[in-house]
Image (spheres, rainbow, N blue to C red):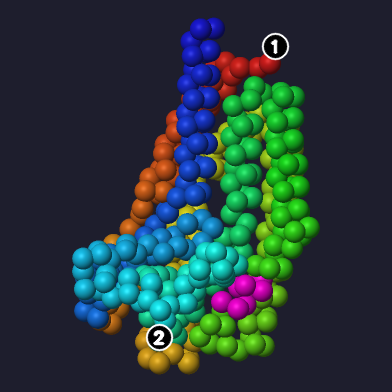
């Protein structure tokens, strides 16, 4: 009995560590990509043209240039000079903080580079997955809480209650607050940044709205399947840590898939014509005069922690189930 209790504590500890790492990973940069070229000197771009991929979007990864450098001084003068449109926090509180500022925005810079060969803006990638990622993380979190809950009615209650809360969150956020409609509008505006074809982009926007609703319906169906499966088949509970544990794989598949999409769906209006290509997923590559770098960042390390912890917890629980020692409610 003591050995069983210790094993349960270990399983719970591993699962809670994985849960904390998973939550941290959602807010962390998972992967970084950088472009370097002679026309982007280190004095101005110490990390090259660098961006960070998150589960819910892409963010600027450029470091600020040193204040003592020539480019740093020029950038400071442009940002703070009399001709700058950077807002006044007192008089213009509602204006965009970064409007027309000359600071390094490498997402914009990379979009500018890419559009010359016909690539669409980076923000148009994964238009369904990014805004819905938070709900899938909520789904995974409920699964993990259900996994560490003793089997039986209590586990079903935890799963059911948690999934109802996530479903309500989806409905309120996407429909009641209108975030789905706003996302589609922003997506269409972003898609038209360089290559504005209203009829084509309208179809894209309609597809984003449709596929988002299909994915949300699929999430609800998955919730029902999980609860029914756990209630009916004891071994089905092993999926509770397995599905979230594969997050590192999910990200790589998504990342590689969208890189392929961007490299094989270039607009003919681009200033330069290049053959379809597969951008570098991992490591270093070369595109025209640019050197490319693509590597995991510290957020991916958190995903590896999730995988390792949940794999160990799953194996321990599987052995308990095989030996008939899984803890049941008294």
> Could you say which quadrant of the image residue 45 lies in?
bottom left
Left-right relation of 203 to 297: right
- Residue at image position (51%, 68%) is 88
Is 245 one of the magenta-colored residues? no
- Residue at image position (57%, 22%) is 321
3D distance between C-alphas at marks 2 and 1: 66 Å
- Give SS at disc 1: loop
Q: Is residue 51 visible?
A: yes
Predominant secondary structure in magenta? helix
Left-right relation of 68 to 293: left
Left-right relation of 231 to 278: right
Q: Is residue 110 visible?
A: no
Say which residue label 2 marks.
117
* Magenta span of residues: 184-190
Q: Residue furthest right?
A: 176
Q: Residue furthest top?
A: 1
- Residue at image position (48%, 10%) is 3
Locate residue 93, reporting x and y percent.
Answer: 58, 65
> Could you say which quadrant of the image residue 140 lies in?
top right
Answer yes or no: do the residues labelled 2 and 1 have beta carbons within 8 Å?
A: no
- Residue at image position (47%, 77%) is 85
Q: Residues within 10 Å of mark 1 (few under 14, many from 20)?
A: few
Residue 330 marker: 1
Q: Say how many tags the image has.
A: 2
Look at the picture and state if 211 lies above or below 30. below
> Could you say which quadrant of the image residue 84 lies in?
bottom left
- Give SS at disc 2: loop
Q: Residues within 10 Å of mark 2 (few under 14, many from 20)?
A: some
């Amino acid at each position: 009995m003591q050995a069983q209790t210790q094993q349960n504590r270990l399983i719970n500890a591993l699962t809670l560590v994985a849960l904390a790492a998973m939550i941290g990973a959602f807010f962390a940069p998972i992967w970084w990509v950088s472009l370097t070229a002679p026309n982007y000197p280190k004095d101005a771009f110490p990390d090259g043209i660098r961006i960070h991929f998150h589960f819910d979007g892409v963010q600027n990864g450029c470091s600020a240039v040193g204040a003592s450098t020539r480019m740093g001084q020029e950038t400071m003068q442009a940002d703070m000079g009399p001709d700058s449109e950077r807002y006044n926090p007192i008089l213009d509180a509602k204006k965009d903080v970064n409007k027309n500022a000359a600071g390094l925005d490498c997402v914009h810079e990379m979009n500018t580079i890419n559009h010359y060969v016909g690539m669409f803006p980076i923000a148009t990638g994964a238009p369904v997955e990014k805004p819905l990622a938070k709900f899938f993380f909520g789904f995974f979190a409920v699964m993990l809480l259900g996994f560490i809950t003793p089997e039986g009615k209590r586990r079903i209650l935890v799963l059911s209650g948690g999934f109802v809360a996530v479903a309500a969150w989806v409905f309120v956020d996407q429909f009641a607050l209108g975030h789905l409609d706003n996302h589609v509008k922003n997506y269409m505006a972003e898609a038209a940044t360089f290559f504005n074809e209203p009829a084509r982009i309208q179809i894209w926007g309609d597809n984003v709205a449709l596929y988002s609703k299909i994915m949300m319906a699929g999430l609800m169906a998955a919730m029902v399947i999980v609860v029914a499966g756990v209630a009916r088949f004891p071994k089905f509970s092993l999926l509770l840590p397995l599905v979230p544990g594969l997050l590192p794989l999910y990200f790589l598949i998504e990342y590689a898939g969208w890189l392929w999409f961007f490299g094989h769906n270039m607009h003919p209006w681009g200033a330069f014509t290049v053959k379809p290509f597969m951008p570098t997923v991992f490591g270093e590559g070369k595109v025209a005069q640019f050197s490319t770098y693509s590597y995991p960042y510290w957020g991916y390390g958190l995903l590896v922690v999730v995988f390792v912890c949940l794999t160990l917890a799953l194996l321990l629980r599987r052995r308990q189930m095989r030996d008939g020692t899984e803890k049941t409610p008294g």
